[in-house]
Image: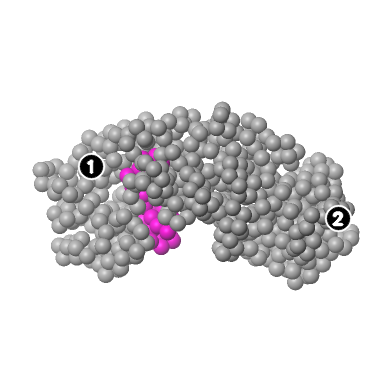
């Protein structure tokens, strides 16, 4: 599906009167409270208010021994925020397994006692709304909801579902689907941006996260932000803190440009933190989000509008992404991988760049010079060195290219020898398998650069090379930066080598990407401060 609707998104929403200037979007943030007692619920409500939520979703199905008249009165009267009451049955993904009449009676009572919103499932909406006909308090809005925990239907099917929900007399339509692929989210965006009624459109699972973050851009009535990480009422919910502090949720609007990091996995990435802090600091109207992508080609086919303006690209997509670019910078072409893609505003074409090698090679050179950057007129300290690269993927290609340009002799070590050989031939170097690294020490003072994910969280006990083999290296670099001190770097330092963290490569490559994304000079001190305080 080519997402033509998405390219119209911003103007459509503005014509509908949604959004507005930065900091003025009307999308609400709702925090679910799921205490097992009324006291726990009230405590969570206080935290939600302190954390900046606009309202709370009171999940009655989590309460032990609900006493409707007594408990609802306390919850409504003592809540410091507007309330949305949900009493979700097992058959719609909730906890409640009891009598249906008792469940719906409790929701009716919540309404009578002054709840601001109640959520009723489409399956029982007709029955419920008939029972309150003409007796609905003016101040209570009824949300009619539908949850699909299996998939995200076609645009046509979602549109029909929304029409069915509207026909019940709902004040607010809520649809929640499940993303099997990140492109599923586009179909829900198309529906929400064209909706003539208040609508909550969310896509569950990590692949659907973007639907929860970009509600203000595409006209969503509200999104959910949890009080604590992991305490979710549906799969894929971000925290309240992340929505407000990491993604600058209040500043997003219909004309906000979307940037993101394409990878698998992407949850570990520091890029959203870095770019969003910088965007906010300079007042740039953009947001940077994690994009868990399985198929790069499909992703670019669907998110083809100018709204999606630029991307960082990480493992395992750096080579596939190059093939999807309309134009590729000569350096990226020589490397055979891209880590930065810009959608050119004038014609929408995708332009690929590689900023990896600059960040990494500069950091390694600085390490060799004793961490005192100098303008070495006599050339690079890498010249003539034996430079061993572990990994033959996109990052491996970038490091091998950079080392070769600086005059180093390159050796590629890879799990699959054939891939190592292919890259080594391209770089005029030597190839070995990772297994051979253990006994590979033709000379002392070599440089080692790990470009694989070995040692990355959560597998922090792994390392690509035994400690005893590290004594032949004068400097060891690890592209992994979560954790900052990997097992490889720790053991290299213990073996007497200079170590260079992947954070240095990350910060270095980010400078150029930021400038390509925004057209503004990179706030280098801010970048370094953000990264170092988070590590």
Could you tell me residue 432's position as x and y percent? 82, 51
**Is residue 437 placed above or below 204 in the rendered structure?**
below
Secondary structure mostly seen in magenta is loop
**Is residue 44 placed above or below 167 in the rendered structure?**
below
Q: Does the magenta stretch include residue 234?
A: yes
**Residue position for label 2:** 385
Could you tell me residue 54's position as x and y percent? 31, 55
Could you tell me residue 483's position as x and y percent? 61, 63
Q: Which residue is drawn at 51% across and 38% down?
A: 308
Q: Which residue is drawn at 34% across and 57% down?
A: 53
Describe the element under mark 1 as helix, strand or loop. Answer: loop
Circles 2 and 1, Cβ within 8 Å, touching? The answer is no
Could you tell me residue 382's position as x and y percent? 83, 54
Query: Is residue 417 or residue 107 the one in the foreground?
Result: 107
Residue span colored magenta: 217-242
Furthest toward the bottom, the residue is: 494
The first of marks 2 and 1 along the sequence is 1
Describe the element under mark 2 as helix, strand or loop. Answer: loop
Q: Does the magenta stretch include residue 65?
A: no
Q: Going by the image, does 203 lie left or right of 460?
A: left
Instruction: Report the disc number at residue 171.
Output: 1
Query: Is residue 324 or residue 92 the one in the foreground?
Result: 324
Q: Going by the image, does 429 lie left or right of 151?
A: right
Q: Can you see residue 316?
A: no
- Label 2: few (<14), some or many (≥20) within 10 Å? some
Q: Residue at x 26, y 35 (%)?
A: 164
Q: Which residue is drawn at 46% across and 31% down?
A: 7
What color scheme is it? Answer: one colour
Q: In which quarter of the image is the C terminus?
A: bottom right
- Label 1: few (<14), some or many (≥20) within 10 Å? some
């Amino acid at each position: 599906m080519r997402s033509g609707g998405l390219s119209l998104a911003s103007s459509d929403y503005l014509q509908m009167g949604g959004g507005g200037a930065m900091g003025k979007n009307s999308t609400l943030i709702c925090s679910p409270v799921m205490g097992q007692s009324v006291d726990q619920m009230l405590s969570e409500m206080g935290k939600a208010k302190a954390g900046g939520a606009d309202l709370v979703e009171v999940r009655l199905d989590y309460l032990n021994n609900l006493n409707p008249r007594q408990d609802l009165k306390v919850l409504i009267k003592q809540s410091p925020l507007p309330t949305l009451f949900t009493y979700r049955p097992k058959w719609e993904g909730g906890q409640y397994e009891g009598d249906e009449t008792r469940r719906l009676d409790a929701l009716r009572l919540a309404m009578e006692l002054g709840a601001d919103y109640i959520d009723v499932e489409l399956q029982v909406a007709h029955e419920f709304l008939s029972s309150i006909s003409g007796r609905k308090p003016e101040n209570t809005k009824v949300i009619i909801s539908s949850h699909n925990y299996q998939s995200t239907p076609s645009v046509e099917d979602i549109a029909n579902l929304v029409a069915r929900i509207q026909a019940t007399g709902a004040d607010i339509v809520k649809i929640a689907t499940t993303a099997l692929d990140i492109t599923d989210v586009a179909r829900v965006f198309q529906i929400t941006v064209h909706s003539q009624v208040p609508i909550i459109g969310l896509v569950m699972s990590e692949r659907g996260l973007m639907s929860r973050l970009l509600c203000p851009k595409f006209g969503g009535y509200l999104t959910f932000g949890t009080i604590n990480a992991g305490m979710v009422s549906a799969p894929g919910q971000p925290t309240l803190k992340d929505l407000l502090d990491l993604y600058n949720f209040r500043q997003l609007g219909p004309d906000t440009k979307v940037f993101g990091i394409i990878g698998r996995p992407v949850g570990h990435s520091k890029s959203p933190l870095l770019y969003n802090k910088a965007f906010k600091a300079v007042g740039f109207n953009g947001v940077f989000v994690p994009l868990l992508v399985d198929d790069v080609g499909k992703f670019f086919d669907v998110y083809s509008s100018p709204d999606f303006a630029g991307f960082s690209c990480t493992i395992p997509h750096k080579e596939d992404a190059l093939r999807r670019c309309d134009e590729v910078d000569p350096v990226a072409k020589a490397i055979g991988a891209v880590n930065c893609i810009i959608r050119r505003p004038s014609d929408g074409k995708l332009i690929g760049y590689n900023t990896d090698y600059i960040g990494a090679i500069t950091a390694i050179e600085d390490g060799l010079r004793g961490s005192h950057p100098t303008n070495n007129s006599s050339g690079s300290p890498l010249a003539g060195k034996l430079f061993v690269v572990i990994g033959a993927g996109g990052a491996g290609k970038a490091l091998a290219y950079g080392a070769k340009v600086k005059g180093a002799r390159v050796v590629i070590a890879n799990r699959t020898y054939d891939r190592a050989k292919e890259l080594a031939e391209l770089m005029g170097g030597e190839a070995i398998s990772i297994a051979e690294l253990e006994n590979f020490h033709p000379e002392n003072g070599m440089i080692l650069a790990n470009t694989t994910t070995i040692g990355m969280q959560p597998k922090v006990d792994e390392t690509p090379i035994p400690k005893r083999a590290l004594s032949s290296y004068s400097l060891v670099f690890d592209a992994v930066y979560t954790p900052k001190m990997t097992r490889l770097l720790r053991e290299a330092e213990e073996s007497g080598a200079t170590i260079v963290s992947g954070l240095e490569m990350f910060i270095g490559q980010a400078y150029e990407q930021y400038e390509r994304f925004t057209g503004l000079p990179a706030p280098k001190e801010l970048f370094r401060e953000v990264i170092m305080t988070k590590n």
